[in-house]
């Protein structure tokens, strides 16, 4: 019995002592106590029951929520797995690429040209299937029937199709059409990765002749279709452009003329492919320096000496390529048209029967006072006339035939002193541009040699480089950069410049422009203002 119950009994005894009528005894007290205990028990059980019920309900709700969240997470994981399986951008490893079997020549139907804005250049070359050895034919209208994924400068007189094969689809179509193989493109990709790895932090390449080496490296990336927007090499290209734009114009030493010509060439191509406004004015200044330092004859000499006398075709070749690229931008530069007229006239004067395309000459006496006649010079002269739209002119027919029948026999890696990579760079483009039966055997030979002689790290070493050239490249690394860019540019020949055997002469385009006419091949293009896109 509790203390409380004891107190009740004491209270009863005090209150009813001696009055048995008012108090019936123990039975009533027990009843009251039992009722009290029952109420206390009920009151004590209500709280735990409510608490227990609440927690059971809470646990059930939480269990439902956990099961539901697990289901959602599982569904989300499944979606992510599907997306991962669909996206694979890995470049094929060189060792996994096999030489495709020869496929008989068949008629190839090529897509209609379309020109779209450049947003990003896909550098995935896994689409190179069914590669064949079909040579570009003089009957192919290849300069207008390939897919164009590169937007060039908006000029009605600059061919928008000449760079049209540099996009991913254009590369695949051109490689299949013109005989590019997977091993060659794997070698090219290895070279591009190596070039990106050895780029200086400031965006340049090399330690000496930096404008020239940087220009050649940038030309190689541009030829592959890479711009400042490319996923793989965009930063490399952007930094190279920035360095060239900001590098000072130099004039003095004879090799500065080479460097400046190549630098200008690269800036013109970069502007044509990107339309970046930051390139425009520095590019025009570079072009103007070339124009102002051209000899009246149309040639160029060391240190940009304008006095009539020595005329250097090797140096002139790089300047002519820069003038052609400048014309392709569509930008107006005072004296550009006249400079091209003089260049074409001088080249045709050097070509033809007899002693043609010599390394240097004096006072336009091409049949006398000749210091040397190198086979590389016929390739230089022939390519420059082809790029100027004069590929069918009589003056280079004999030289093209000689390259196709005689010089091809000298395509040996260790035969460099007689026929060097420098010569291969020009001759490979000449054979591609001339097309027909000239291209197929040359294509087989040069690809095989480049694939077999590339270092596993991605570079080529120039075999037996001329000491005079090597001394201006800053040592072994500079020589490797020089050799690698020349080889890389050769491996882009299939899509770098589409065959121009059907193209209109630049001289005709200039004449049409002066008369206010549109080029018949460009009459569907409209003149638009340059888009002012800032790079830096």
Image: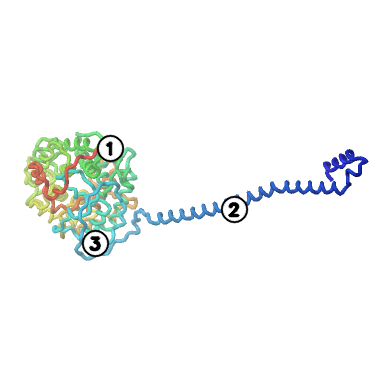
Q: Is residue 489 above or below residue 12?
A: below
Horizontal and vertical percent for residue 315? 17, 42
In primary-sequence order, the first of circles 3 and 2 is: 2
Q: Nearer the viewer, residue 462 or 324?
A: 324
Tell me which residue sits at (91%, 40%) in the image. 17
Label 2 secondary element = helix
The image shows residue 29 at horizontal and vertical percentages of 85, 46
- CB atoms at circles 3 and 2 under 8 Å apart? no
Apparent side of residue 195 relative to residue 493 in the rendered image (left or right)? right
Query: Reading the chain from its start, which is encountered first: label 2 or label 1?
Result: 2
**Residue 361 seen in this snapshot:** no
Q: Residue at x 19, y 59 (%)?
A: 135
In whole angstroms, how far apart are the C-alphas of marks 1 and 3? 42 Å
How crowded pointer 3 is (Cα within 10 Å; few <14, some 14-19, many 20+) is rated as many
In the depicted view, which residue is nearer to us: 186 or 40? 40
Q: Residue furthest bottom?
A: 104
Instruction: Tell me the crowding category of disc 1: few under 14, some 14 to 19, or many 20 or more residues within 10 angstroms, Cα based.
Output: few
The colour mode here is: rainbow
- Crowd tier of the residue under label 2, counting other residues whose Cα lies within 10 Å: few below 14, some 14–19, many 20 or above: few
Badge 3 marks a residue whose secondary structure is loop
Q: Which mark is residue 534?
A: 1
Report x, y in % for residue 223.
24, 48
What's the CA distance linking mark 2 and mark 1? Answer: 61 Å
Q: Earlier in the sequence, mark 1 or mark 3?
A: 3
Q: Residue 489 versus residue 531: which sits nearer the camera?
A: 531
Spot the residue most to the front: 21
> Disc number at residue 60?
2
Q: How many numbered tags mark residues here?
A: 3
Residue 132: mark: 3
Element type at mark 1: loop
Please state, as top left, top right, bottom left or bottom right, where the C terminus lies in the image.
top left
- Depth-wise, is mark 2 or mark 1 nearer the camera? 2
């Amino acid at each position: 019995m509790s203390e409380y119950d004891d107190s009740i009994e004491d209270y009863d005894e005090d209150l009813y002592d001696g009055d048995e009528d008012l108090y019936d005894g123990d039975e009533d007290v027990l009843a009251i106590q039992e009722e009290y205990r029952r109420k206390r028990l009920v009151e004590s059980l209500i709280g735990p029951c409510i608490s227990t019920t609440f927690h059971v309900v809470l646990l059930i709700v939480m269990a439902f929520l956990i099961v539901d969240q697990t289901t959602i997470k599982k569904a989300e994981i499944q979606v992510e797995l599907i997306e991962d399986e669909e996206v694979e951008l890995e470049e094929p490893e060189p060792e996994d690429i096999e030489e495709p079997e020869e496929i008989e020549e068949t008629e190839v139907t090529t897509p209609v040209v379309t020109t779209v804005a450049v947003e990003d250049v896909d550098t995935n070359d896994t689409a190179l299937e069914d590669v064949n050895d079909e040579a570009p034919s003089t009957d192919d209208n290849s300069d207008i029937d390939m897919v164009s994924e590169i937007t060039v400068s908006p000029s009605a007189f600059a061919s928008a199709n000449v760079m049209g094969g540099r996009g991913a689809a254009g590369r695949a179509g051109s490689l299949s059409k013109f005989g590019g193989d997977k091993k060659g493109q794997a070698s090219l990709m290895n070279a591009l990765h190596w070039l990106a790895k050895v780029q200086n932090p400031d965006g340049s390449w090399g330690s000496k002749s930096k404008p020239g080496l940087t220009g050649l490296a940038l030309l190689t990336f541009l030829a592959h279709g890479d711009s400042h927007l490319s996923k793989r090499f965009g930063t490399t290209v952007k930094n190279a452009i920035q360095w060239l734009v900001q590098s000072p114009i130099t004039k003095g030493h004879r090799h500065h003329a080479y460097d400046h010509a190549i630098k200008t060439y690269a800036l013109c191509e970069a502007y044509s492919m990107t339309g970046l406004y930051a390139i425009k004015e520095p590019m025009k200044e570079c072009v103007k320096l070339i124009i102002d330092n051209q000899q009246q004859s149309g040639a160029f000499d060391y240190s940009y000496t304008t006095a009539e006398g020595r005329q250097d075709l090797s140096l002139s070749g790089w300047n002519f390529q820069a003038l052609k690229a400048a014309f392709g931008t569509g930008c107006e530069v005072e004296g550009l048209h006249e400079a091209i007229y003089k260049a074409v006239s001088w080249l045709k004067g050097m070509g033809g029967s007899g002693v043609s395309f010599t390394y240097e000459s004096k006072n336009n006496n091409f049949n006398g006072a000749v210091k040397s006649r190198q086979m590389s010079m016929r390739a230089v002269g022939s390519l420059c006339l082809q790029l100027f739209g004069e590929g069918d002119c009589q003056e280079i027919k004999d030289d093209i035939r000689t390259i196709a029948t005689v010089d091809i026999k000298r395509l040996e890696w260790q035969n460099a002193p007689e026929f060097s990579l420098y010569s291969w760079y020009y001759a490979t483009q000449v054979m591609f541009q001339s097309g027909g039966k000239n291209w197929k055997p040359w294509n087989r030979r040069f690809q095989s040699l480049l694939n077999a002689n590339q270092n596993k790290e991605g570079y080529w070493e120039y075999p037996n480089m001329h000491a005079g050239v090597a001394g201006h490249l800053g040592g072994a690394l500079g020589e490797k950069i020089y050799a690698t860019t020349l080889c890389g540019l050769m491996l882009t020949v299939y899509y770098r410049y589409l065959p121009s055997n059907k193209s209109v002469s630049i001289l005709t385009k200039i004449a049409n422009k002066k008369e206010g006419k549109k080029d018949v091949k460009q009459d569907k293009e409209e003149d638009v203002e340059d888009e002012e896109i800032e790079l830096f």
